[in-house]
Image: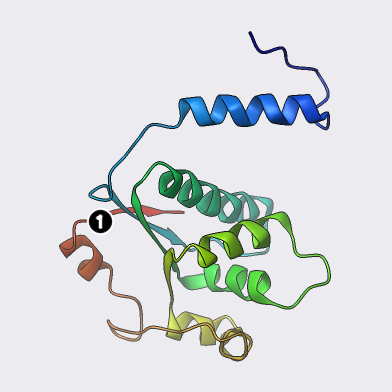
């Protein structure tokens, strides 16, 4: 039996929630392919929630064994610029994204949109590769052709 305290900052609570999440994560295979496209901008709470969840979903799916790729498109390119910027104390989401990147989770960034939203130079300076396979944008059709289901946030 797991007993949860009402205080989410308590160490026991976090350990219990981690145990519950681990027990509830289904096992998938690399044949399960999900492409998560983040288009939400940095200006609103809704955009912040979509950005956070793009990384959470990608982490959970990868942990379960699925093949996951991320595409930063439209205003979503601004999030990657924030997450790859040097920071004394990176945000929780930046840390989660860095862990995905370190694991080798593939991601693409729209070349056109990074310029349109004013973050191209920052991304290039951070060593982030930009793509423009279809009219200067990432090719969604190529991912679908490779068997990926597409989720757009």
- Number of labelled discs? 1
Q: Please tell me whether residue 114 is drawn above or below residue 57 in the rendered image.
A: below
Q: Please tell me whether residue 93 is drawn above or below residue 111 in the rendered image.
A: above
In depth, the one of 53 and 116 nearer the eye is 53
Q: Where does residue 104 sit, x and y in percent of width and height?
A: 45, 66
Colour style of the rendered protein structure: rainbow
User: Residue at (55%, 30%) from the top-left corner?
Assistant: 21
| 145 horizontally vs 112: left or right | left
Q: Secondary structure at mark 1?
A: loop
Q: Residue furthest left?
A: 145
In depth, the one of 29 and 125 nearer the eye is 29
User: Residue at (16%, 64%) from the top-left corner?
Assistant: 145
Q: Where does residue 59 sit, x and y in percent of width and height?
A: 50, 49
Q: Where does residue 129 sit, x and y in percent of width and height?
A: 46, 84
Q: Please tell me whether residue 30 is drawn above or below residue 128 in the rendered image.
A: above
User: Residue at (49%, 62%) from the top-left corner?
Assistant: 103
The crowd level at tag 1 (other Cα within 10 Å; few <14, some 14-19, many 20+) is many
Q: Where does residue 13 sit, x and y in percent of width and height?
A: 75, 25
Q: Residue tagged by mark 1?
A: 148
- The image quarter in which residue 135 lies: bottom left
User: Residue at (68%, 51%) from the top-left corner?
Assistant: 45
| 39 horizontally vs 98: left or right | left
Which image quarter is the N terminus in?
A: top right
């Amino acid at each position: 039996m797991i007993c949860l305290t009402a205080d989410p900052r308590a160490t026991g609570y976090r350990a219990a929630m981690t145990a519950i999440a681990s027990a509830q994560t289904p096992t998938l295979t690399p044949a399960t392919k999900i492409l998560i496209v983040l288009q939400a901008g940095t200006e609103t709470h809704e955009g912040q929630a979509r950005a956070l969840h793009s990384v959470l979903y990608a982490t959970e799916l990868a942990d379960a064994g699925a093949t996951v790729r991320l595409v930063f498109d439209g205003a979503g390119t601004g999030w990657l610029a924030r997450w790859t910027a040097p920071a004394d104390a990176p945000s929780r989401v930046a840390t989660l994204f860095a862990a995905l990147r370190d694991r080798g989770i593939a991601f693409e960034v729209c070349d056109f949109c990074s310029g349109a939203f004013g973050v191209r130079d920052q991304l290039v300076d951070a060593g982030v590769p930009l793509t423009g396979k279809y009219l200067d944008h990432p090719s969604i059709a190529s991912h679908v052709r490779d068997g990926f289901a597409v989720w757009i946030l």
